[in-house]
């Protein structure tokens, strides 16, 4: 069974960098699929952030592209998210998820981790 | 404002059927069969219920079905059960630079 687990600080100061890691078990990232991040501000809907292939190719939401970096570490079977220059608007539950290559689904999701941006 | 438009809420009684709509454009819902639906219970991660417009992942009840007409996709839940009460989100690939968009979500209440 494929499982994803997010980890990282739950509190980040404004203007600093949000860093999260997603550990994958039950499936080797190197075997395929894309791996990405989706966020959900409290009480609001879902927003796609971006995704990465084990080869390193990345896709980002243009609204966040200037501040986002997604990277992959196949040796640890995990991938990471960095979002810099954060503001209160970046406060959200951040989910990692596996995405199909044809963009038709995110089939496995992590439980999510709440990141609050506050001084 | 979300790229895909969903009703904010729908409701139904146990045993009834309900349909949730998801309206986009020819650049997303209407142009590709890459529509998916997710169920989200409070405090939980979204769960994939439908992909490629009408396909159900293994383990998802056949009470859930999906369809599409033009720029509008629909999720139908038949034989409503109390456990179906949740938020539902649609998603689609888009040919715009955004690449992937979600609907604003629909809260389903089982009366």
Image: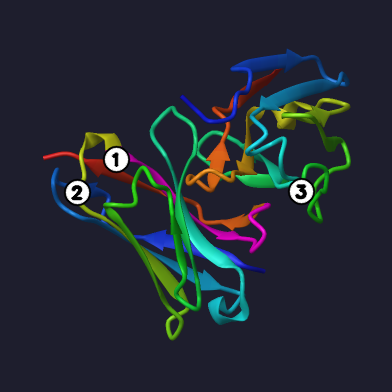
Q: CA distance from mark 3 to mark 1?
A: 30 Å
Disc 3 or disc 2, which is closer to the eye?
A: 3
Q: Is residue B111 visible?
A: no
Which chain letter matches label 2?
Answer: A
- Which of the marked residues, 1 or 2, is nearer the chain's N terminus? 2
Q: Is residue A93 left or right of residue B106?
A: left
Above or below, comparing residue B76 to residue B91 in the picture: above
Q: Residue B62's spot in the image, x, y percent?
A: 88, 41
Q: Residue at x 62, y 68 (%)?
A: A2
Above or below, comparing residue A52 to residue A56 in the picture: above
Circles 1, 2 touching at the beta carbon (< 8 Å): yes
Disc 1 or disc 2, which is closer to the eye?
A: 1
Q: Residue A23's spot in the image, x, y percent?
A: 45, 70
Q: Residue A76's spot in the image, x, y percent?
A: 43, 81
Circles 3, 1 touching at the beta carbon (< 8 Å): no
Q: CA distance from mark 1 to mark 2?
A: 10 Å
Q: Is residue A35 visible?
A: yes
Q: CA distance from mark 3 to mark 2?
A: 37 Å
Find disc 3 in the rendering and name its residue.
Answer: B52
Neighbor class of circle 3 (other Cα within 10 Å; few <14, some 14-19, many 20+) is some
The part of the chain drawn in magenta is A90-104
Quadrant including the C terminus of chain B: top right
Which chain letter matches label 3?
Answer: B
Residue most extreme to the left:
A119
Q: Residue at x 63, y 42 (%)?
A: B92
Q: Which mark is residue A12?
A: 2
Above or below, comparing residue B31 to residue B57 in the picture: above
Find disc 1 in the rendering and name its residue.
Answer: A90
């Amino acid at each position: 069974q494929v499982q994803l687990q997010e980890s990282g600080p739950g509190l980040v100061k404004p203007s600093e960098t949000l860093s999260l890691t997603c550990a994958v078990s039950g499936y080797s990232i190197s075997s395929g699929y894309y791996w990405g991040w989706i966020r959900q501000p409290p009480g609001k809907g879902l927003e796609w952030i971006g995704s990465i292939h084990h080869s390193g190719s990345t896709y980002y939401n243009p609204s966040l592209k200037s501040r986002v970096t997604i990277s992959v570490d196949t040796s640890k079977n995990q991938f990471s998210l960095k979002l810099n220059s954060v503001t209160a608007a970046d406060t959200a539950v951040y989910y990692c998820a596996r995405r199909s290559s044809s963009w038709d689904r995110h089939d496995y999701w992590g439980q999510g981790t709440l990141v609050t941006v506050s001084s | 404002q979300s790229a895909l438009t969903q009703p904010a809420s729908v409701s139904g009684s146990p045993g009834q059927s309900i349909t949730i709509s998801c309206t986009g454009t020819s650049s997303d819902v209407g142009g590709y069969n890459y529509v998916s639906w997710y169920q989200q219970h409070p405090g939980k991660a979204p769960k994939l219920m439908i992909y490629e417009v009408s396909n159900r992942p293994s383990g998802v009840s056949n009470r859930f079905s999906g369809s599409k007409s033009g720029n509008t996709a629909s999720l139908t839940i038949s034989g409503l059960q109390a456990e179906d009460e949740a938020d539902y989100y649609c998603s689609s690939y888009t040919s715009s630079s955004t690449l992937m968009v979600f609907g604003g979500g629909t809260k389903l209440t089982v009366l």
